[in-house]
Amino acid sequence: MGEKQTDIFRQALISLREEIEQLSDANKEAADTVTLDQSTVGRLSRMDAMQAQQMAQETARRRLLQLQKIDGALRRMDAGDYGYCHSCGEAISAARLGVDPTSTRCIGCSDS
């Protein structure tokens, strides 16, 4: 993979990381603890709030995982290992990296 193409993927990864961080900052309140004040909120409303809290926590977990994948891809770029399959060592196609720039396996190894 050429330096120009790597720079394009680097910018895509940095932009994706910034977007995820902005979304995480905007949704921090949703994952906060649900207050159980029965005088202001009924049982069903509390259940809805608890379900929304769980969904927000899962979303935050998935965003953290995506940030870890992005950081790993950027480290591989710095080490010169970006774009190569961890399983077989062959180059990962640019089309696959275009869809998911954090990919660590070629299409052949991802199926097995």
Image (tube, rainbow, N blue to C red):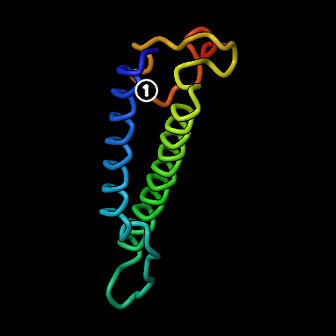
The residue positioned 47% from the left and 76% from the top of the image is 33
112, above or below 27, in the image: above
The residue positioned 44% from the left and 16% from the top of the image is 96
- Say which quarter of the image contains residue 9: top left
Pick the residue in front: 46 or 63.
63
- Please, which residue is most extreme toward the bottom here? 39
Residue 65 image position (x, y, % from top left): 53, 46
Where, quadrant-wise, is the C terminus in this rendering?
top right
Q: Amino acid at mark 1?
A: Asp
- Lateral position of residue 53 relative to residue 81, left or right: left
The residue positioned 37% from the left and 28% from the top of the image is 7
The residue positioned 66% from the left and 22% from the top of the image is 86
68, above or below 47, in the image: above
69, above or below 59, in the image: above
Q: How many marks?
A: 1
Residue 74 image position (x, y, % from top left): 49, 38
Considering the numbered disc 1 on the image, is that residue within a helix, a strand or a loop? loop
- Please, which residue is most extreme toward the front here? 3
Pick the residue in front: 95 or 35.
95
Q: Residues within 10 Å of mark 1 (few under 14, many from 20)?
A: some
Residue 35 image position (x, y, % from top left): 43, 82
Which residue is labeled 1 in the image? 100
